[in-house]
């Protein structure tokens, strides 16, 4: 068997070092021994955006971007989306195994039990401006929840971790729906614990004067599938935010607020909104070739295409496309779908996109479905945050139990002024004028 090491020669000194390779990875700290002198700090590695740096060992989610594979705890996303419910998959992400019927019943009972929020949370949300963005309300309110649960600080107590996990998964749809109702000036609807996780969410969003909201089973299932597809995606920007913030041992409500804030950004949870804007601008199937030409010339990007990890079809996009057909049978066809299908057809046959391995990603079709279901565009990141909370919590639980983890505290390459003396304020103008 080949020697599992890396031999490095420092040409500054001519010295050679042998660094172990484990899991096709070298440890950054093994490079610190490489020095030009005894008082040298040692070699660092530089990786803005963490494009080639593993921050943890994880057993939760695996992506093989070249093959278009996504697995939660070893199960392909296609099988999970086909057969499971969101709460079943949430159990899998949190505990590592699919539940038995008894375990699922107990888990559903616990989640259902925690769907209500304290009445003061409702009052807190009433304080937001009428036109506040629902994602801003969600981020602020989740952070505020930490003040209601003092026991959440006990992050090393397994029982406390269980409680906060259940509370967060249960309360996110309630807060999300309250944020939506607030932005529409509608009264809040309390959770209906007879309904499924997705069904209850739809009830809290859409219920008006009817005594009991009956969710359409096709739309309820579509929301559940979309929740499954968005539940985790390994070390993405928001999962990394959760891990980084929680590494200070702060409570998980504060950590989840930080993760949701990361998701809010247009480079992360906001791309499906950009897809909708792009499809609306194209406006007609006939104009697709003209726009594709523009994208190839570097005039904007084909939104919803390309991915840092996937250099193949995003497996989630395939499932979403099938879900779209089912949703449109109920809601009527979103006219933007025809433009999207034509765009995909032309792009996938075009050498520019083939050579660069650009395929539809999860956001290409999700916005079209959400729009057909009646969600306003500013709710799109909120719809992402609800299921992703499960992923953030799975990542958090792994982090706090990992003895190798420390507070996240990167190094820097300092390129600013070295040591200089303070000039008294009355002399600064004269010195600067002299320098100019
Ligand atoms: N349209 C046209 N050209 C593209 C696109 C696109 N959507 N994406 C990448 N390219 C081209 C680039 O111009 C570049 O071409 P070049 O080699 O001639 O310079 C090449 O493909 C590689 O692109 P990079 O930007 O280096 O790829 P990277 O992995 O850094 O970017 C990203 C990935 C940000 C997702 C990119 O593909 C993109 O901007 N896509 C559109 C936005 C989008 O849909 N984002 C959602 C991602 S999914 C999610 O976050 C939930």
Image (cartoon, grey):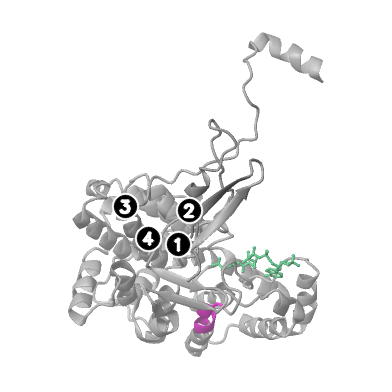
Query: Which residue is depicted at the point 38% across and 47% down?
Result: 406
Q: Is residue 316 above or below residue 46?
A: below
Q: Is residue 342 visible?
A: yes
Q: Which mark is residue 27?
A: 2
Badge 2 or badge 3: first in the primary sequence: 2
Badge 2 or badge 1: first in the primary sequence: 1
Q: Which residue is mark 3?
A: 403
Q: Secondary structure at mark 1?
A: loop
Question: In the rendering, at what x and y percent does residue 14 appear?
Answer: 64, 44
Name the front one of labels 2 and 3: 2
Write the start and end of the magenta stretch as one range. Answer: 314-320
Q: Are marks 3 and 4 in contact (CB under 8 Å)?
A: no
Q: Quadrant of ligand 1?
A: bottom right
Question: In the rendering, at what x and y percent does residue 403 appear?
Answer: 31, 52
Task: Decide which of 75, 109 is in the foreground and name it.
Answer: 75
Name the front one of labels 2 and 4: 2
């Amino acid at each position: 068997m080949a020697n599992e090491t890396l031999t490095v020669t420092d040409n500054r000194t001519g010295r050679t070092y042998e660094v172990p390779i484990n899991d096709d990875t070298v440890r950054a700290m093994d490079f610190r021994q490489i020095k030009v002198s005894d008082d040298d700090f040692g070699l660092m590695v530089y990786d803005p955006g963490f494009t080639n740096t593993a921050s943890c060992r994880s057993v939760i989610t695996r992506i093989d971007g070249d093959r278009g594979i996504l697995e939660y705890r070893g199960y392909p996303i296609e099988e999970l989306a086909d057969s499971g419910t969101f709460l079943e998959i949430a159990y899998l992400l949190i505990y590592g195994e699919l539940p038995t019927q008894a375990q699922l019943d107990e888990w559903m009972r616990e989640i259902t039990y925690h769907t209500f929020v304290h009445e003061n949370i409702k009052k807190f949300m009433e304080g937001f401006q009428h036109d506040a963005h629902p994602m801003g309300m969600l981020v602020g309110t989740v952070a505020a929840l930490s003040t209601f649960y003092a026991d959440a600080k006990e992050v090393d107590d397994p029982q406390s971790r269980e409680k906060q996990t259940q509370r967060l998964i249960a309360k996110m749809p309630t807060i999300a729906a309250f944020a939506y109702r607030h932005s529409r000036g509608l009264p809040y609807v309390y959770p209906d614990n007879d309904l499924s996780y997705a069904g209850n969410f739809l009830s809290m969003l859409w219920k008006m004067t009817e005594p009991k909201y009956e969710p359409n089973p096709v739309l309820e299932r579509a929301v559940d599938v979309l929740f499954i597809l968005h539940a985790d995606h390994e070390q993405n920007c928001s999962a990394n935010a959760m891990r980084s913030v929680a590494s200070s041992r702060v409570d998980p409500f504060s950590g989840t607020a930080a993760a949701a804030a990361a998701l809010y950004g247009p480079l992360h949870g906001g791309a499906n909104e950009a897809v909708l804007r792009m499809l609306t601008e194209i406006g007609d199937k006939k104009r697709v070739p003209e726009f594709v030409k523009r994208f190839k010339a570097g005039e904007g990007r084909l939104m919803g295409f390309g991915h840092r990890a996937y250099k193949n079809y995003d497996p989630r996009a395939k499932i979403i496309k099938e879900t779209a057909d089912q949703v449109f049978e109920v809601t009527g066809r979103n006219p933007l779908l025809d433009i999207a299908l034509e765009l995909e057809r032309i792009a996938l046959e075009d050498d520019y996109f083939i050579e660069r391995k650009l395929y539809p990603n999860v956001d290409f079709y999700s916005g079209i479905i959400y729009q057909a279901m009646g969600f306003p565009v500013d709710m799109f990141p909120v719809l992402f945050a609800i299921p992703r909370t499960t992923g953030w919590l799975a990542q958090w639980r792994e982090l706090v139990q990992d003895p190798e983890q420390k507070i996240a505290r990167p190094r820097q390459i300092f390129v600013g002024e070295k040591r200089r003396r303070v000039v008294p304020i009355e002399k600064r103008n004269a010195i600067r004028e002299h320098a100019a």
